[in-house]
Each structure stands twice: as structure tokens, then as C-alpha cells.
Amino acid sequence: MCALIRAPDKSLKEAMAKAGKTRQPARAGASGQGSGGSSAAGASAPARRKTVNPFKFISEVRQEGRKVTWTSRNETIVSSIFVLVMATIAALFFFGVDSLIGLVVNFLLGLGA
């Protein structure tokens, strides 16, 4: 990335050559349009998507689900309790900080009255 930062007297082409990178021309059909003009690749119809049998799809999903390492019931309960405790501690901390800032602001505003 630093090799692309160039001095004002160098051109972008020289900086890219120094970095060992060259611009590749866009492939026809890569973005759905050709590089301009009419070409045989751009005039062809879009590729059809492969259809999938719903029963085969469900079977594959179940197979992938069997590969997943699921947490145990005990681990899920312990993790949930930990999250609740940490959220409560964070809420109490921010409540305390907010109350302290409020007291300081009210004290400062009370000095001017």
C-alpha cells in the first residue's frame, strides 16, 4: 500500500509498476455488460441458475446440521447467566456514572444562581 503513495512528479502508472501491480482489463460479461460496443459475449442471454430439488436441499441442510458442534444445555445456561450478570453490572456502572455527572452538573449550575 505504501508503494502506491507517490511523489508529485511520478505518474500513477509508474507508482503501480514500482509496486508490481498492473491494471487488468475488465473481462467481458464480468459485470453483466461488455467493455463497450456490441460483442458476442455481451449479447448472450444471462446464465440460468441451477435448480435444486427441495428434498435434496433439506437433506443437505440436515447433514450440515449434524456436523455442527452444539453446546450442551449446561454450557448454554451458564453462558446465559454470565451474560445477564455482566449486563446488570454494566447497567449499574453506567447508572452510577450518569448520576455522578448529573450531581456535578447540578452543583456547577447551582453556583451561578
Image (tube, rainbow, N blue to C red):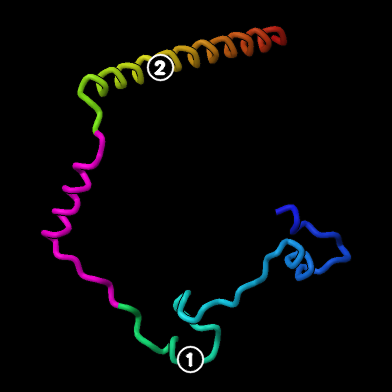
Q: Report the amino acid beneath label 2.
A: Met
Residue occupying the point 55% across, 13% down: 97
Q: In this view, does 21 lie to the left or right of 86?
A: right
Can you say whether 80 is above or below 10 in the image?
above
Residue 39: mark: 1
- Residue for badge 2: 86
Name above or below for residue 52 compared with residue 82. below
- Is 24 left or right of 57, judged from the image as shown? right
Residue 84 location, quadrant: top left
Membership of 111 in magenta stretch: no
Circle nearer the viewer, 2 or 1: 1
In the image, which residues are magenta? 48-69
- Return the mark for residue 111: none
Q: What separation in Å lies between label 2 and label 1 (alpha carbons)? A: 62 Å
Left or right position of 77 against 100: left
Q: Is 51 one of the magenta-colored residues?
A: yes
Q: Residue at x 59, y 77 (%)?
A: 25
Q: Where is residue 81 in the image (x, y as percent from the top left)?
A: 30, 17
Above or below, 82 relative to 70: above
> Which element is circle 2 on?
helix
